[in-house]
Amino acid sequence: MSGRLPSIYADPGLYDLVHAEGTDDEAWLLDLLAHDHGCGIKTALEPACGTGRYLAALLRRGYQVEGYDAASGMLDFARKRLAGWGKRARIVRGEMTKYRPRARFGLIFNLLSTFRHLMTDKEALAHLKLMAGALEPDGIFVLGLDLSKYGEDQPDEEVWECRQGGRRAKHVVMSLPPETDTRRERIINFVTSKGAVLESSYDLRSYSADELQELIGRSPLKIEAVYGYDGKPAALHGPETALWLVLKRKTE
Ligand SMILES: C[S@@+](CC[C@H](N)C(=O)[O-])C[C@H]1O[C@@H](n2cnc3c(N)ncnc32)[C@H](O)[C@@H]1O
């Protein structure tokens, strides 16, 4: 595992609560992108799948799914969530830099800047290579991440409240912009629930549009299309920095 995992990932129930909103809409968008750009095979793989929230939504859309993650608590939570789907759902332990799936998939996706947990070019390229090798011919890999504009990025703070069943939580996420030389964006999370405060701070690797383009150029993948998080077409070097990239295998 690349470094210690953020402590928010050790409480899958709380993680799931604060990320639940919008999950079905994003699964709808993934399915649409697979339909528009992919090969029509309804199998999906999610690296670093966490609680399996996207996988559950894709199962309801007729997919057969596989997910892997490095955190035991996340794996237990995802396995329990998907237990009723039998052989249509597989959850396994795996590292983004090492896990080589046995099957091939029409859709692979890695959203929410999770790819930015990989802190070196070597790790990032290893992941892109493994995922390229797990794509069906003409399958797509959707990579969702926030890009940096060095020198222009400002410290940011987002606050939202959520409620699910009888549980409520307030989530505050602060971020400190990265520097060009270190390429580390500091993320500070506070989640309050049932009177307790869970604090979690960690670094994510930053990418400018040029840095991401250069990295993908060295991988077996190419950029097929670019969208904003809202599903509207966008450009890698455009004003929008929260992007979903649709990647495909380069043709030999
Ligand atoms: C932001 S969460 C995303 C979870 C899920 N994909 C989602 O969008 O809800 C990041 C996940 O990545 C996992 N993770 C972090 N580094 C990892 C690595 N090197 N290999 C595998 N999983 C990793 C964590 O355990 C956590 O579940």
Image: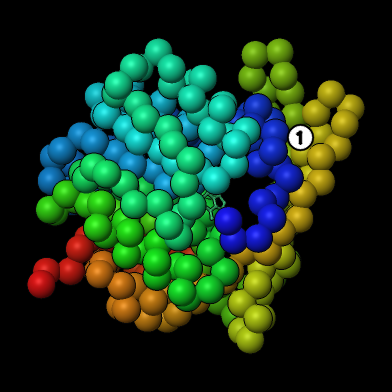
Q: Is 89 on the left or on the right of 186, as rendered?
A: left
Residue shown at 56% from the left, 27% from the top:
76
Figure quadrant of the N terminus: bottom right
Q: Where on the picture, by quarter, is residue 16? A: top right
Q: Residue furthest right?
A: 195
Q: Position of residue 112 (x, y in %)?
A: 51, 50
Q: Position of residue 154 (x, y in %)?
A: 69, 70
Q: Amino acid at mark 1?
A: Lys
Q: Nearer the viewer, residue 241 or 74?
A: 74
Display coloring: rainbow
Q: Where on the picture, by quarter, is residue 34? A: top left
Residue shown at 34% from the left, 17% from the top:
86
Figure quadrant of the C terminus: bottom left
> Can you identify the residue that label 1 sits on?
170
Kindly tell me whether residue 221 is visible in this rendering: yes
Q: Position of residue 60 (x, y in %)?
A: 33, 21
Kindly tell me whether residue 51 is visible in this rendering: no
Instruction: Describe the element under mark 1 as helix, strand or loop.
Output: strand
Q: Please say if 217 is above or below 27.
A: below
